[in-house]
Amino acid sequence: MTGIETISGTPRNLARRKFVDKLMISLCVIAGIITILPLLYIFFFTTKSGLSSLNLDFFTQLPKPVGEEGGGMANAIVGSLILIGLGSIIGIPVGILAGIYVSEYSGSLTATLVKFTTDVLSGIPSIIIGIFAYGIIVLPMQRFSALAGGFALGILMIPTITKITEEMLRLVPQTLREASLALGVSRWKTTLFVVVKTASSGIITGILLAIARAAGETAPLLFTSFGNSFWQSSIDQPMAALPLQIFAYAISPYEDWHRQAWAGAFVLILLVFVVNLIVRYVTRNKFESSV
Amino acid sequence: MLHETSSNPLSDQQENPEDVSSIDIQDSEEHEKESKIAVQTECLSVFFNERPALKDINLKIRKNRVTAIIGPSGCGKSTFLRSLNLMHEMTPKSKVLGSIKIHGNDITESNAVDVRKNVGMVFQKPNPFPSMSIFENVVAGLRLNGNNKKSELEEIVERNLTHAGLWDEVKDRLKSPAVSLSGGQQQRLCIARTIAVNPEIILMDEPTSALDPISTAKIEELIYNFKDEYSIIIVTHNMQQAARVSDFTAFLYLGKLIEFSKTRRMFTNPRERLTEEYVTGKFG
Ligand SMILES: Nc1ncnc2c1ncn2[C@@H]1O[C@H](COP(=O)(O)OP(=O)(O)OP(=O)(O)O)[C@@H](O)[C@H]1O
Ligand SMILES: [Mg+2]
């Protein structure tokens, strides 16, 4: 019995191990490609079908009635931006604060409860969130409104932002918190200006993810924001939104509207992309966050 | 009063007549006795989850002296240090009993934020704030507490970095991220950050254990030079370091204070058998 045999095994064994190794890597590569393909496909198709029906009118005109050529989705683009803005006003602060609470004040019963609740909330279908907003805003106000739509989007954004904030804050080493506290900095300042700041780029990624999701949501807007074919005067009125408009046009029987729906889809993707770039630029860190 | 109250739980022999206090009295500058105590703990005990980590520590730590805390791993050195800046308040299920007086005032009922402005801390691993530049790190404590006068801060940065022996190395790149510095430089930056808030007492928990010998030597030199302005309490695993930098040494074992005396005496002629075994490397 030699030592070498007992350590590295027989040659046959070695070959088998190498094969398993290769197999594993191949499976990972295949899985990687499978995740990339749908994205490429979506980009390719929306660009191909959307770009051709896109023109200046699309960004400046209101939708035309059936039968008339042309028109655009200017009101839906602006509407979507307003709805995302309203959603962000609710979703971002609540999401971040809840994430801070769960991470920095963990151990208390309420923190555990909040964590559990956000996990459950993130699993609730968005249409149910829409019904919820309908129940507590649309019914009492007696009309559909952008406010209700923004509220529904905000609620949808909360669990994503809370979860990512919590995870990013947990990655911040404990010793940084202690270093700040040891300087005589109060707990809340330590949390905001040291811990959250250190984790900021991760948190921003979470926010962008939540915004991207919310921007494309249709279901929660169906009976809240409802949609509008004209310029909306204020946020307590029904408001057009790109996903709603796309939905309405895509299921219509008219060829022209189908083209407009493709253009709308393309603009929606573009919108998310541009918001992404702007937020990244505005909040860019002086240094790469080291977390 | 200055009489040493070190408990000798493992000793059954009588106190050596030449105990710490009698040595101290030979110290020439012994006039204002009370003012010379920086930290005094009485019956200080710390519990985690009802399990004791420190038991009845009675210690008097001198002002403008370096006091080393030594002892085997897990004996409660860090626990002792962290009780002095009330850091245990951050640990759920921890309990601190007894009294801790800093310059005569009991801090156990004080506001931790105020206490920590006066009792700075340097940690084992260099921990500059990664989201901040070198400049911002030095003034982090001041800025977060509301001092934002630019000219004042610039002067503070230069003074404290010079004091921490780092100014010449970083003066041309104050705006670069603090984490771009080497480990030893980062630790000196952390020291600059600590002294920038003007503490009177500095706690150091194995400040050089993550550093190379040259960086270690630089920090030991700093500690030595800091004596005029600060009272320093340093935890170390390195006997030579304790012997080099400290005036007094406390030896902890299993959460108890075994011996507290002048460093020279501790390493040449300890009173306790246990201390001798530890400092000569028989265990630990
Ligand atoms: N946060 C905590 N929760 C529970 N137990 C703790 C905690 N901190 C310390 N302890 C316990 O208290 C005892 C003393 O720990 P401490 O960190 O003070 O040791 P130490 O002397 O600094 O050791 P080392 O030299 O390894 O740093 C240990 O038994 C440790 O397990
Ligand atoms: Mg320790």
Image (cartoon, coloured by chain):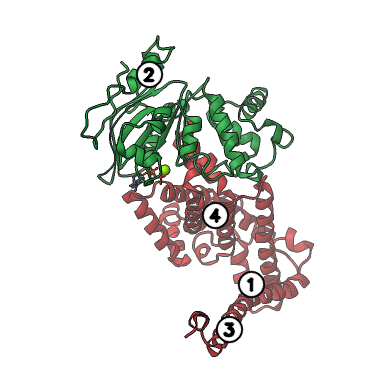
Secondary structure under tag 2 reads helix
Determine the residue positioned at 53% across, 29% down: B223
**How many C-alpha atoms fall within 10 Å of the one at disc 1: few (<14), some, or many (≥20)?**
many
Instruction: Choose the circle earlier in sequence order: 1 or 4.
Output: 4
On what subunit does the disc labeled 4 rest?
A: A
Q: Image check: B153 left or right of B20?
A: right
Taking depth in this image into account, of A74 and B177 the one nearest to the observer is: B177
What's the CA distance linking mark 1 and mark 3?
A: 55 Å
The red chain is: A
Q: Which residue is mark 2?
A: B24
Secondary structure under tag 4 reads helix
Q: Which residue is mark 4?
A: A146
Mark 3 vs mark 2, foreground winner is: 2
Q: Which residue is mark 3?
A: A18
Instruction: Choose the circle earlier in sequence order: 4 or 3.
Output: 3
What's the CA distance linking mark 3 and mark 2?
A: 71 Å
Q: Which residue is mark 1?
A: A249
